[in-house]
Image (cartoon, coloured by chain):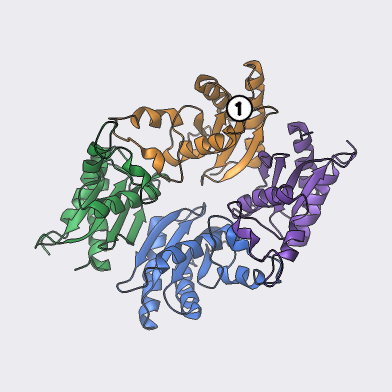
Chain colours: A blue, B green, C orange, D purple
Amino acid sequence: MNITLLQAEKIISAAKEKAKDLNTKMNIAVVDAGANLISFQRMDGAWLGSIDIAIKKAKTARYFDMNSGEIGNLSQPGGPLFNIEHSNNGLITFPGGIPITNGAGEILGAVGVSGSTVDNDHAVAQAGADAIKGI
Amino acid sequence: MNITLLQAEKIISAAKEKAKDLNTKMNIAVVDAGANLISFQRMDGAWLGSIDIAIKKAKTARYFDMNSGEIGNLSQPGGPLFNIEHSNNGLITFPGGIPITNGAGEILGAVGVSGSTVDNDHAVAQAGADAIKGI
Amino acid sequence: MNITLLQAEKIISAAKEKAKDLNTKMNIAVVDAGANLISFQRMDGAWLGSIDIAIKKAKTARYFDMNSGEIGNLSQPGGPLFNIEHSNNGLITFPGGIPITNGAGEILGAVGVSGSTVDNDHAVAQAGADAIKGI
Amino acid sequence: MNITLLQAEKIISAAKEKAKDLNTKMNIAVVDAGANLISFQRMDGAWLGSIDIAIKKAKTARYFDMNSGEIGNLSQPGGPLFNIEHSNNGLITFPGGIPITNGAGEILGAVGVSGSTVDNDHAVAQAGADAIKGI
């Protein structure tokens, strides 16, 4: 199972709508089941530094099949995964990366969002991930 | 002057239509006036290795404000720009990267396409660049 | 469709047998449909520099769904893909990388071999790829 | 003294058996006395992000001839090796990397495991390292 471009575009559309609701400007990336980029959009005026972060959040979520922020909980000083961010050419381990699953619970890829607070980033990514949940 | 996400999406839509006309599957990237990624799409089944190449073609075209293939003409053994590809974390200097200009001739960004022969890549990128030419 | 570890191990076993027939010592890598490493073996005494080359050959073959050497034919000075090797963190474009397909012709991944002449590398990779062809 | 491919394969087999006992899916890497990769396997469904981590754990263990987690104890904020992870193209300093010794106590290489909790990763790596201990 792998995500299609059409699904990725639905995810980005839903994420952008949520970003506008929150009055934010976001970078939004979608990777496939192999953690390879399939689609990306940067909203006008969104942070340039968030291009790479959005892509790395999406990859991180697919690399470990969990929300990026969950890894960040474990990678703190003294935590079991301290400095895991040095792997895979750089992980981003704060919220905003979420795996994408189909109706059967299979992982198809992941979405990563960056451009505001991590709470907003996560909310926008969740709106994206939810957009194809019933499929 | 800078490209907008809406313009970038028009470029990608036109490029995808051309790609389908040519019976090809393409990776299409658009960068802005600062050579930073603004939008990207990989058509289903397109080469995975072309993700990076499409982005690098777009960046190369904006880095030097000319078609990527023109730089390739100068970077051959014995040429004035031999091995310029070693700069900027890797250039791609064969056809498929084209600067994007507005009606006044100002450069707004660039488009890069990869996934087929360089002739097809260039034709698809040109279709994308033409989509906002009158603006 | 994706390759399994069991299939990857069959590929490596067949490749090693061929390597011994040719009196060579090889590095053999298998990547999956997402171009991610699934299995690797370095035969005793094989070149250390071929670890990275074998992996890059396998990735190159999957990145473009063709034998690595075919890309090398196109990437020569004056050729249409000159210096494509600067993409994707480094391609290897001489023979020894071959896509792996199932009986239905679907691409499941790729195998990359390095450690001898490119003719031997290719022959060993082909023996590996052939090992699961009927599946 | 150096590890052989045959020994590396025994290590990986034992590690995989332990991984199955623990109901986990692991990436398992073995490096030789020169810290160069000799063998690698990713079990079906194991995390993609753990490919790099397993290899880096094995290298880390051989770079310093101690368990990767021991280095992590020293690399915390305020510790003597704070942020040593920035060296060697990225170390991984939590448990799962273990030096491999022969019966005489000579170091032959190292094994690195990633795919579950660090306790499981370490247990699987230990099962691998134990597999050739009497040799």
The local crowd at label 1, few if under 14, some if 14 to 19, many if 20 or more residues have their Cα within 10 Å, is some
Expressed as whole percent of the image width and height from the top left, the position of residue D46 reads 65, 52
Residue positioned 28% across, 63% down in the render: B34
Tag 1: amino acid = Ala
The answer to whether residue C55 is above or below residue A92 is above
Q: Label 1, on which residue? A: C131
Expressed as whole percent of the image width and height from the top left, the position of residue C113 reads 56, 30
Residue positioned 66% across, 22% down in the render: C17
Expressed as whole percent of the image width and height from the top left, the position of residue B75 reads 27, 38
Q: Is residue D20 at all visible to an observer of this figure?
A: no
The answer to whether residue A59 is above or below residue B44 is below
Q: Nearer the viewer, residue A82 or A62?
A: A82
Residue extending farthest to the front is: D80
Q: Is residue C112 at all visible to an observer of this figure?
A: yes
Expressed as whole percent of the image width and height from the top left, the position of residue B52 reads 39, 49
The answer to whether residue C40 is above or below residue D27 is above
Tally of marks: 1
The chain holding disc 1 is C
